[in-house]
Image (spheres, helix red, strand yellow):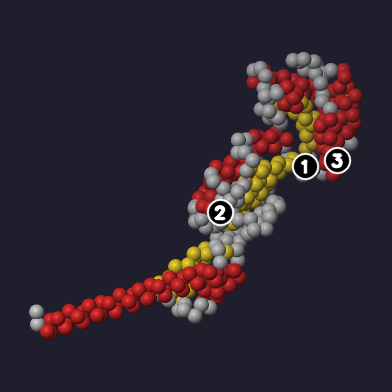
């Protein structure tokens, strides 16, 4: 081998060694910069480097926190450029729910009167369009998007959040209003309805979800005139404490209910401009059609009693629902007793 060839090989080896040293130093510097920037930002952020350029990702609760994090990264003397991949996901606030500060996740509100669903927060691992399509499928009307909804972060909602969401939307269709939050640790919902049987139906739709589900249902008054509202309050409060009784398996009123019926007839006379719907209900024992017939006959008996005690017959209407509208489970004697009832509804 000639001296020229040996010199060339030596030069190539030297250049290779120098290149390796430069690469090693650059890699070490890059890692050092990334580590130091990560330490400046603290937990909750991921930092990766490409030479003197760093990429910062993670989630923050506000634009101000985002800017603050980027400024900290840029303040490192070795950083040339900062690439922002931080997601801004604010604390979840759902009107009607008392959520603690720092709660993350997503939720919605619903109002039957306006037929509007308002989506709030960030939907994990799914687009807002999927949620809105599901709401439309449940027949809840139009949808209002409050913020950007797709976070792509499945850790921002409880495991199985799709099941909670679907059940909540099904319940919302039965309610006059709904407020729902799906967080990383729990499901929280508050519903209002103007029907006792619908309140029971909403509650039963969430059975089996365990302690991570916090569901409240409130029965509210319907929109009535002042006289009608007072009348409805008297009916409701009175029948919550006492029952109109009948002879077993018949529509014959028990004499021990006469005093209660007289009191209710007196209330009915106090709202002469309102019509009164008398509803008959039974438990689930026996044949469904027979129960419906019996409940109608019992409602008719109450209607006849009121008419014979000074309430205008033209104001009275009776209907039998049988076992269709329970307000308690039919699995126990106490639940069955609650379901065997007469309800009075004031209508304008």
Query: 195 or 6: which is nearer to us?
Result: 6
Query: 263 or 339: which is nearer to us?
Result: 339
Frontmost of labels 2 and 3 is: 2
Is any part of residue 238 visible from this angle?
A: yes
Image point 64% across, 21% down: which residue? 288
Disc 3 secondary structure class: helix
Residue 30 on image: x %, y %: 42, 73
Which residue is tagged 1? 221
Frontmost of labels 1 and 2 is: 2
Query: 206 or 240: which is nearer to us?
Result: 206
Which residue is tagged 3? 230
Q: Quadrant of residue 285?
A: top right
Circle nearer the N terminus (2, 3): 2
* Quarter occupied by the N terminus: bottom left
Which residue is tagged 2? 156
Image point 75% across, 27% down: which residue? 338
Circle nearer the N terminus (1, 2): 2
Task: Relative to 57, say whether 13 is above or below.
Answer: below
Circle nearer the N terminus (1, 3): 1
55 left or right of 218?
A: left
Image point 55% across, 71% down: which residue? 40
Query: 120 or 70: which is nearer to us?
Result: 70
Q: Quadrant of residue 197?
A: top right
Task: Relative to 68, say whether 187 is above or below.
Answer: above
Is any part of residue 144 visible from this angle?
A: no
Image point 51% across, 52% down: which residue? 154
Q: Quadrant of residue 199?
A: top right
């Amino acid at each position: 081998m000639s001296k020229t060839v040996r010199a060339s090989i030596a030069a190539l080896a030297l250049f290779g060694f120098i290149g390796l040293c430069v690469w090693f130093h650059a890699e070490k510097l890059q890692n050092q910069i990334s580590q130091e920037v990560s330490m400046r930002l603290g937990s909750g952020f991921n930092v990766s480097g490409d030479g003197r350029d760093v990429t910062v990702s993670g989630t923050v609760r506000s634009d101000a926190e985002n800017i603050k994090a980027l400024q900290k990264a840029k303040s490192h003397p070795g950083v040339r450029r900062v690439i922002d991949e931080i997601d801004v996901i604010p604390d979840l606030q759902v009107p009607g729910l008392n959520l603690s500060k720092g709660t993350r996740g997503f939720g919605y509100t619903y109002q039957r009167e306006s037929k509007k669903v308002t989506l709030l927060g960030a939907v994990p691992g799914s687009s807002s369009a999927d949620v809105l399509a599901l709401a439309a499928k449940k027949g809840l009307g139009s949808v209002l998007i409050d913020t950007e909804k797709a976070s792509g972060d499945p850790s921002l909602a409880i495991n199985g959040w799709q099941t909670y969401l679907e059940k909540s939307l099904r319940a919302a269709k039965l309610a006059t209003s709904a407020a729902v939050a799906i967080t990383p640790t729990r499901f929280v919902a508050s519903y209002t309805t103007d029907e006792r049987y619908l309140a029971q139906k909403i509650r039963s739709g969430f059975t089996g979800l365990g302690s991570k589900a916090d569901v409240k249902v409130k029965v509210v008054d319907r929109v009535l005139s002042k006289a009608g509202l007072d009348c409805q309050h008297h009916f409701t409060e009175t029948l919550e404490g006492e029952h109109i009784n009948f002879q077993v398996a018949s529509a014959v009123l028990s004499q021990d209910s006469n005093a209660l019926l007289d009191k209710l007839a007196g209330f009915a006379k106090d709202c002469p401009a309102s019509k009164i719907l008398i509803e008959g209900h039974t438990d689930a024992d026996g044949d469904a059609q027979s129960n419906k017939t019996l409940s109608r006959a019992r409602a008719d008996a109450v209607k006849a009693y009121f008419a014979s005690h000074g309430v205008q017959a033209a104001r009275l209407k009776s209907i039998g629902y049988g076992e269709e509208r329970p307000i308690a489970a039919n699995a126990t004697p106490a639940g069955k007793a609650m379901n065997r009832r007469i309800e009075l509804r004031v209508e304008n």
